[in-house]
Amino acid sequence: MGAGERIAGVLITLALATLLLSLDYSRSGFGSYSYYISSWRTVGIPNLVTAIVADWRAYDSLGEATLLFTAVTGVYLLLGGKKK
Amino acid sequence: MKMSLVVRTTTKLMSPFLVAYAAYLMIYGQMSPGGGFQAGVILAVSVILLVVSHGYRSVKKRFRLKEVGAIEGISALGLVLIGITGIIFGGFFYNFLRGYWSGGTIPLFNIGVGLKVGAAFVMVFYIMLRWVESD
């Protein structure tokens, strides 16, 4: 890693930082957040986090599980073979 | 590279309790704090603890890579099946077992995710160890 690449890396991260900071992070009132808080009891279980993770947004958790699955298959493909 | 006798016996004593705790988190994920992902990691830790203390070769005979991969695949299939059978009753991942027990498909979902995450981390650990020791 020469000095030039390191400087370029720093510049890119700074540019990314300014871009992300300039975005608007104020909480919009009517998003899914207020809906979750007001009516998570309809799922019928006392644990709010699991109600959202496993019932309302189970599709996201399924995506997360498949993400882990692809990660493991990736590691297996890369490192699984017999060392030449 | 095995560790001393003391470490081996303590890990042998302790890992079943880790599995019991992970099972508790998995099954009671909807009543008390818990869930599939945390339970899976604790499952993986109980196996990795044995691998670290007993060395990779002896544990490999007991928990083979093929079986761990099969567990991961089957539980992933189970998750997708839960989602698909939901389509028959309503939308994707529709909670069709709600009346039968508290949470309906949520415990099944947690158990599927727990087994999957546990098997995934054990597999990663095996693959990396095998690559390092290249036996």
Image (tube, rainbow, N blue to C red):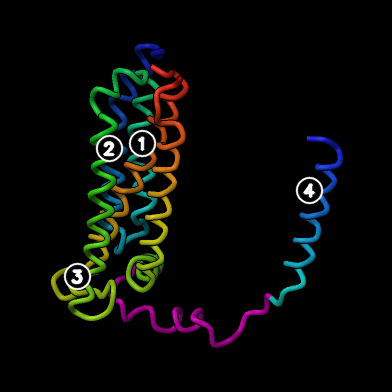
Whole-angstrom CA distance, mark 2 to mark 1, is 7 Å
Q: Which mark is residue B122?
A: 1
Residue closer to the observer: B60 or B45: B60
Which label sits in the foreground, 3 or 1? 3
Residue closer to the observer: B30 or B129: B129
Q: Is residue A50 left or right of residue B78?
A: right
Whole-angstrom CA distance, mark 1 to mark 4, is 35 Å
Where's residue B122, x and y in %?
A: 36, 36
Residue denoted by label 3 = B85
Residue denoted by label 2 = B68
The amino acid type of the residue labelled 2 equals Val
Quarter holding the C terminus of chain A is top left
Which picture quadrant has residue B104?
bottom left
Q: Is residue A71 left or right of residue A4?
A: left
Q: Is residue A77 above or below residue B84?
A: above
Q: Residues within 10 Å of mark 2 (few under 14, many from 20)?
A: many
The amino acid type of the residue labelled 1 equals Val
Total count of labels: 4
Query: Which portion, as a residue range, is magenta?
Result: A25-48
Mark 2 and 4 residues: CB-CB less than 8 Å, in contact? no
